[in-house]
Amino acid sequence: MKLFSDARFSSAVVVAAGLVLGLCAVGVLLKAGIDNFVNKDRSVTVKGLSEMEVKADHVTWGITTKSVGNDIHELSAKINEDKATLVGFLKSNGLEDSDIVVNPPTMYDKMTDRWGNRETPYRYFATLSMTVSTSKVDVVREIANKVGELLEKGIVLSEPEYGESIHYDFINFMSMKPKMMQEAISNAEITAKQFAESSHSNIDKIVNADQGQFSIEDRDATTPHIKKLRVVSTITYSLKE
């Protein structure tokens, strides 16, 4: 009987030990699952900024001059003379024919306008316009500072009707995109690490990334030929203990 009792006792010990080990294993797995579930929902979303100043690489300049007269033939001759003078002025200062687009002149006869002001001393009004479109930004800036020389030749440039007559652009921004994107992501990572450190965590993987949009603006009102490039990226990182 004693041997039978000892065997039953030993068997019970083994079963109990197995249950304990099983419960421990379940506990470990359960804890790991809970930790994974908690860590899965732990994340931080940050923004990374990259800015850069560059010189404009393209310029568009709208040039307009107006003339008046009572003899349409004389006025036409004046327009053609002004056109030759303006094109010669631009080319002598560094531009080429390919940089200049001359638009057909327009002529207005006030006698054909029923509601026009007929008290003015002139019947005909002519407008000559041309557009400079070129990558020679510095050349155009220098020419724009010399337009006073045209006064000596009897040509007065008209003020633009809408906004500035000279518009500067930066069209080569795609070449800057990879570098600026990398800088924005690096700055976002620095911010995420600072947040994680404050919360006693570490950043893990990128969960979501929005590269954002590039913006190109004038640096300020007095230097429109200097552009400020800007991109903001939004990055979400998962966190781990």
Image (cartoon, rainbow, N blue to C red):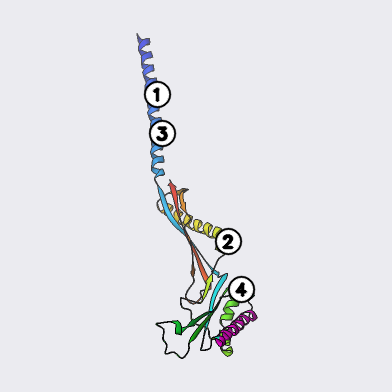
Read off the residue under disc 3: 29
Residue 176 position (above or below residue 2): below
Residue 96 position (above or below residue 152): above
> Regarding mark 3 in the picture, which secondary structure is present there?
helix
Mark 3–mark 4 Cα distance, whole angstroms, equals: 74 Å
Q: Which residues are magenta?
A: 73-93
| Disc 3 packing (10 Å; few <14; some 14–19; many ≥20) | few
Using the rendered image of the protein, determine whether residue 138 is visible from the camera's viewpoint: yes
- Label 2 amino acid? Ser
Read off the residue under disc 4: 99
> Regarding mark 1 in the picture, which secondary structure is present there?
helix
Query: In the image, what residue occupies the spot 55% across and 63% down?
Result: 173
Judge depth for marks 2 and 1 and give the one in front: 2
Left or right, 19 with reference to 142: left
Left or right, 40 with reference to 136: left
In contact (CB < 8 Å): disc 2 and disc 1: no
The quarter holding residue 56 reads: bottom right
The x and y percentages for residue 24 are: 39, 30
Judge depth for marks 3 and 2 and give the one in front: 2
Using the rendered image of the protein, determine whether residue 194 is visible from the camera's viewpoint: no
Sequence-first tag of 4 and 2:
4
Read off the residue under disc 2: 175
Read off the residue under disc 1: 18
User: Is residue 91 a member of the stretch shown in magenta?
Assistant: yes
Seen from the viewer's position, the closer of residues 139 and 98 is 98
Sequence-first tag of 4 and 1:
1
Picture quarter with the N terminus? top left
